[in-house]
Image (spheres, helix red, strand yellow):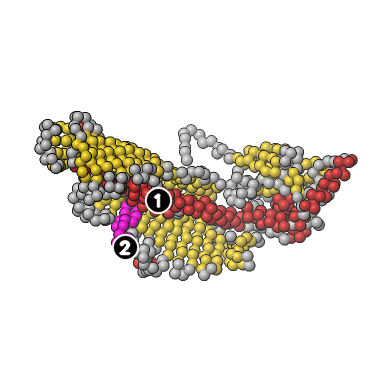
Amino acid sequence: MRKIAWSGLLISLLLVFSLLMGCSSGGGGGKSAPKLETTSISGTVKAPSGTTVASNTGLWQHFANLLITKVRANGTEQAVTEAEVTAVNFNTNQQVGTVATTGNDGSYQISKIPKGINVLIVAEKEVGENRVHLSTLIPEVGETMQLDGAGPGEVNGATTLTALRYHQYRGNNDYKITTIDIENVLKKAKKLSKVQNGTLNLTVGSGDINTDTSGKPQINTSKLADFVNNTQIPNPGYPACADAKRMTQEVRNAGIFMNQALQQQAIKQNQTAQEIASFFENLSTEMEEIDHLITSDFMEARPGEYNLLANGDVELVEQYQNDGQFWEWKLNDTVNEGYYVSVKLTNLNNILVESTDPQTDGYDYAIDLEEAEFEYNVNDSSQSDYYYEGSLTLSNDSTDTITAEIIDEYGTIYHIIIPANPNYNLNGTFHGPESGDVSLNVALTGSAETDLTGTADLSLTGNINTDVISTNGELDISLTGDEDMSAETPDSAELSFTGLVSTDSAQFEGQFDADFVKNPYENDLLPQTIGFNGDYNDLNPQTTTWQGSLEVTADNAASYDPYSESDFPYGSVTFNGQVTHVDYPTLNLDMSANLNKNEADNSEEGSHYLEIAYSRGSRSMNGSLAVSETEDSATLTLTNEQEIEFALTEAQSEVTGSIKDSNNEEIASIDEDTFGPTIHYDDGTTETLY
């Protein structure tokens, strides 16, 4: 009867999974007002060297002037100490949050700022009879993803000019500001010569800023006319454009997240899977040697010590006497001066149910192995780092048994009672040159060999701990093949694992389910469906966590020809759950991707269709991505929570598209420009797509 190996199926499952990964409450009583969510802003206030930020007299004044002249030449900035820092709601012009004073390095922190508002951070300091003003404008504070690593609370000359550029709309409750609008003005402010060479003077009334009729600071247009004229700020008559810009930024952020976080994960998980697969391949190869030894025919002879001969036979060296407690077999490899095997049946007094004189040839033994306990010791003197020590215990949950009769060369008859579907408990330590130390504590139930019905069912429960991987859980396998399972590969297999798998770099916890079918071209089992429901965590370092379910189907796994240029796999991949990365907010993803079956049947390159539902906090997008490889085109259509529609088509490397509001009216067009794909908004502003 043929034994069925299961480790290859587990390897296949882990490999395919990793490569594809590689894609409210209520209560009774009256209602209370929703709790206002707040956030904190911190940063550093630095003034251009052309701005005097400290009071000096006499000799110190001359020294400061010399120092400032040197600093200006280097175009650097100076920390502003002891400045009062406040936060103002840009649209209502009301102060919010706490008040801070900058430290010796210019640092500050303001807390209790309402999330989602457009906040103006103002840092001012009295220097003699003058007032120094610095500021920065942060749209939708606490809601915008910061993907470039820059802190939103930094205050300097460029951020001050950017904030003051919007001065005319301060206090306008209907005016909308977006991150991209701020970034476009900030880029031009940073290129301003006065900013770059440090000569910008932010002293109110005597420098590059003055005041309006209400006494609030504003840009001195007589000195910075070019900056004012060459920077675009949104026309307030097109509020829907701000919503469109937020959506565009969300699309851009999602793309960056997918590329930076998820793509890196696919690479890392693939490396982890290869590490696991390599380990199991080495372990399987090295364990085969043990399997060969402990199932050797010498155990069918009476207990004793044997030598392995060159022709493969065994020679009795010493027959061991039966003391009623245990039987022991030993095998020595005298030909190669290699392995040594010791197998001991330790509870003979419990399983020897009937016997005659054990010292007399020709007598019978009746041995019930339904509760047998074996101890194994395997050493290979030719490989000092190869050994196995452990135990194997049999048990029987049913009354079904098989009786085998063995007659040794001395005429002794052994009537061996074996469970028809035994349970095995394997406990021990294996060490191999490649595998390292492997700790085994596994219970196996079911029929490990064919019952002549063409099926084999196995269930393994326990843990395997090694230097590379640790597992703890239950593995169920069902194999189907010909009647006697004589073929090298079964026709199909079902596999389910529930538990924990850990390596040095990753940890999986949950349930894997997979169905495999035989592929005639590979003459091996290929996955037809795969499902995972649980958690995935990065380790060393801890960067990404997945929580949810993954389902994969390969519709043509049984017929796919990997060696044909005209054939390719088709099926679907779906993921539903949360993805958390240390550098980004938690994302809720509901994605499904399908490879068009009809195209595959026509032996064409095919088309792909991806459905996606994306959410981050209050933001969400739903839509699809259709890719036609035959026409070299792709169309992305997304609709957000405000029913803004973003449509983009790339065909033969040319990008076109549009953005429409909730009334299906176009508020922006997308086309190719000198700087690449560009979005032209109806409010008079533009931005590049990438």
Residue located 30% across and 47% down the image: 336
Question: Residue 149: x and y, percent?
Answer: 61, 49
Q: Write the residue at 12% across / 31% down.
A: 357
Residue shown at the point (37%, 43%) measured from the top left: 384
Q: Residue drawn at (84%, 44%), measured in percent from left and top?
A: 64
Inspect this view and state whether residue 84 appears: no
Specify the amino acid type for callout 2.
Tyr
Provide residue 218's location: percent of width, then percent of height: 76, 51
Q: Where in the figure is residue 630, as x and y percent of width and height?
A: 44, 69
* SS type, badge 1: helix
- Magenta span dominant secondary structure: strand
How dense is the environment of label 2, judged by Cα within 10 Å: few (below 14), some, or many (20 and up)? few
Judged by depth in the image, the label closer to the viewer, 2 or 1, is 1
Identify which residue, 525 or 171, lies in the foreground.
525
Q: Residue furthest right?
A: 58
Measured as percent of width and height from the top left, residue 383 is found at: 36, 45
Q: Sequence order check: which comes first, mark 2 or mark 1?
A: 1
| Residue at which label 1 appears | 278
Which numbered circle lies on residue 521?
2
Residue contact at pointers 2 and 1, CB within 8 angstroms: no
The amino acid on which the numbered mark 1 sits, given as a three-letter code, is Ser
Q: Is residue 523 magenta?
A: yes
